[in-house]
Image (tube, rainbow, N blue to C red):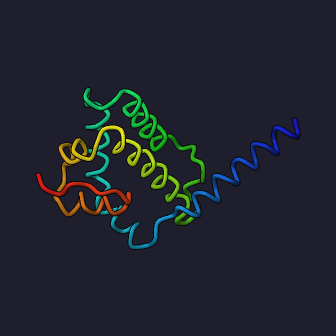
Amino acid sequence: MLVSLAGVLLAWFLLLFLAYLARPDHGSLRDGARILPDTLRLVRRLATDQTVPRSARWLLWGLLAYLALPIDLIPDFLPVIGWADDLIIASLVLRYLIKRAGAGTVRVHWPGDAEGLSTLGGLLRVPLPESR
C-alpha cells in the first residue's frame, strides 16, 4: 500500500514538474485569454466534425470534460499555475489534433479572425495557415 502511494505521489510530482516546465509566459496568458472564446468554439466544432479521426474527437471530448470538472491535476485556487495546467493540457490535445486532422481542418473551423488563428499557432508552437 505504501509503495503504491509513493508511486502515485511520484507521478503527481512529475506531472507538476512537467507543467512547470511547459508553463506559458505572462504574454502568452494574455493572448490565450483573448482567444479563449474562439478556441472553445473551435474545440466544439472539431469534436462534432465527422471528418476528424475518431480518436482525436474522443480526446477533444475528454478535454472538454477535464476542463468542466472541478477536479484538476493542479487545483485552480493556486495562482497562475492552477489555470496553467488547463492551458497546458489543452495545448497538448490541440497539437495532437493538428497532427491527426491537419492544420487545414483547424483553419476551416476557426471562428475568429486571422490574427487570432496566428496567435493560436504561436501559442501551440505549430504553423497554422492564415488565409481563408
Residue 87 placement (x, y as % from top left): 45, 55
Query: Taking 89 as reference, is 2 left or right?
Result: right
| Left or right: 45, with 79 as reference point | left
Q: Quadrant of residue 13?
A: bottom right
Is 89 or 53 nearer to us in this picture?
53
Residue 115, how many percent across, how many down? 20, 63
Q: Kindly identify the residue that appears in the image at 43 percent across and 44 percent down.
A: 93
Classify residue 22 as left or right of residue 43. Answer: right
Horizontal and vertical percent position of residue 131: 13, 55
Report the residue at 69% width, 49% height from top. 12
Q: Residue at x 45, y 49 (%)?
A: 92
Q: Residue furthest left?
A: 132
Pick out the residue farthest to the right. 2
Foreground of the two, 72 or 105:
105
Q: Residue 18's spot in the image, x, y percent? A: 60, 57
Quadrant location, the N terminus: top right
Vertically, is 6 above or below 84?
Answer: above
